[in-house]
Image (cartoon, rainbow, N blue to C red):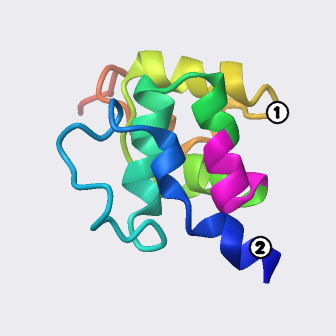
Amino acid sequence: MKKEQKLTDISTLGTQLFWDTDINKLDYQKAYIPIIVRVIERGDQSEIDEIVRLYSKEKVLLTICKEIKFLPNYAIERAIRFFPELRKEDMLCYQNRKDKSYHWI
């Protein structure tokens, strides 16, 4: 019951990160990927701690590695700084980045 109570308070992330969204209408369980992306791109350590509290560290790490298809290079570096156990080579968004060179036949 306590875990369920913790998950209902997404307003602690603050309106400055979600200026373009009505945070009261946001289904944070369905929209976990864009929420995590926004916090990685623009949040600070306290907001990272908040998404870990909301979703669990395992879910946040799995989302960063396997579900986020694009992050800018600076956000990839921020994710690694926030979560030192991450390796960018394991991140789908790093593998799919647009700046890597391709060999054309």
Spot occupied by residue 90 in the image (x, y as percentages of width and height): 65, 41
Residue at the spot of label 1 = 85
Name which residue lies at 30% across and 41% down: 18
Spot occupied by residue 33 in the image (x, y as percentages of width and height): 44, 57
Given residues 74 and 95, the one toward you in this image is 74
Q: Can residue 83 be found in the magenta stretch?
A: no
**Could you say whether the residue bearing mark 2 is in a helix, strand or loop?**
helix
Name which residue lies at 24% across and 30% down: 104
Name which residue lies at 79% across and 25% down: 84
Q: Which residues are magenta?
A: 50-57
Spot occupied by residue 60 in the image (x, y as percentages of width and height): 64, 52
Quadrant (top left/top right/bottom left/bottom right) for the N terminus: bottom right
Residue 73's image quarter? top left
On screen, 59 above or below 76?
A: below
User: Which sits earlier in the primary sequence, circle 1 or circle 2?
Assistant: 2
Spot occupied by residue 21 in the image (x, y as percentages of width and height): 21, 50
* Tag of residue 2: none
- Circle 1 Cα neighbour tier, 10 Å, few/some/many (<14 / 14–19 / ≥20): few
Residue at the spot of label 2 = 3
Q: Amino acid at mark 1?
A: Glu
Look at the numbered discs 1 and 2 and tell me whether their residues touch, using CB distance below 8 Å.
no
